Amino acid sequence: MMTITRDDGRNCLIVEPSGKLARDDFDRLTETFNTMVNESDQIPNLVVHAAEFPGWRDFSALVGHLSFLRDHHKMVAKIALVSDSRVLDVAPKIAKHFLFAEIRVFPGSALDAALEWVAAPMDAPNHVTILTDLPPDVIGISVRGVISAKDYHDTIVPLIERKLQDHPKVKCLYQIGPEFKSMTPGAVWSDARVGMMNLSAFSKIAVVSDLEWIRHGTRVFAPLIPGRVHVFGNSEMAEARLWISGDDA
C-alpha cells in the first residue's frame, strides 16, 4: 500500500510505501498529483519516504508505476528519496538516464532535510525568451522548461497585445527547443484562449521545433488556421527567420 500526503506549503507530495505496491496505489498517486496541479497551477515535487523498496504486488502494479513515470517524469523538478535501503543508493544513477528530475538520497531519519530541499527554490531561468532582430510586425518567442499561466500573463499575452496595437496583422515565430518539458493546465487554457481570441490576426506562423509531436500536431491543425503555417527544425532557424520576415504573398 501507499500513503500519500499533500504538503501544499512546500509544494510536494510525500509518498510512503509499505508492503507490496498495487495498481490502485499508482492510480491514487496520479489522481492526487493531477488534482494538486489543477488547484495550484504548480508542479509538485516528490518525497519518497520508505524503510525499503517494497516491490510490486503484481504485473498490473508495475504497469501502473511505469504509466505514472511516463506521464509525469518531464514535469517533476525534484525527487527526494528518504531511506536507508541500499537499493535506493543506486536509484539516482539509473533514473538519471530517463528522468528529467533532480534526484537526491537522504538518510531515513532526515525527512525534514529532504522536505527543506524540495521546498527550496531552484535557479529559475526565463521560460520565455523574446526573440529580437525581427521586423516590427513579427512576434518572436522561444520557450523552454515548464510553461505556466504566469508566463502567458506576464510575457506572451502583453507582447501580443503591444504588437496588435500597432499592426492590424502580425506574424509569429514560435521556437519550442529541446529544453521544453511541458505546459501546466493553466498555460494550456491560456494558450487556447489566446488562439481563439487572436488567431485571425496572424497572417503567418513559423513553428521551429525538433519535437515530433509538436511538428505533427502543427501540421494537423494548420488547415484550420486562417494564416499560413510553416514548420522548421531547430537547425533551420535562419530559414524560419527569413520566411517569417518576408512578404505575406
Image (spheres, rainbow, N blue to C red):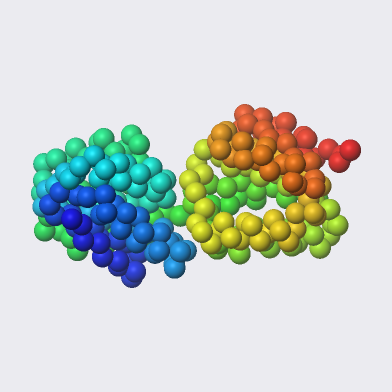
In the picture as drawn, the residue positioned furthest to the bottom comes out as 9
Front one among 52 and 35: 35
Q: What number of labels is visible? A: 0
Front one among 59 and 9: 59
Front one among 228 and 107: 228
Q: Quadrant of residue 228?
A: top right
Asked if residue 245 lies left or right of residue 38, the reply is right
Residue 30 in the image: state x and y as whole percent.
35, 55
In the picture as drawn, the residue positioned furthest to the top comes out as 235
Residue under the point 51% across and 59% down:
185
Identify the image quadrant of the C terminus: top right
Residue under the point 25% across and 36% down:
93
Identify the image quadrant of the N terminus: bottom left
**237 is higher (above) or lower (below) than 6:** above
Asked if residue 128 lies left or right of residue 92, the reply is right
Residue under the point 66% across and 30% down:
236
Q: Is residue 120 visible?
A: no
Front one among 37 and 32: 32
Residue 59 in the image: state x and y as whole percent.
24, 39
Residue under the point 12% across and 52% down:
19
Residue 26 in the image: state x and y as whole percent.
29, 52
Asked if residue 183 lies left or right of residue 71, the reply is right
Q: Is residue 172 visible?
A: yes
**238 is higher (above) or lower (below) than 12:** above
Residue 34 in the image: state x and y as whole percent.
40, 59
Asked if residue 72 lies left or right of residue 191, the reply is left
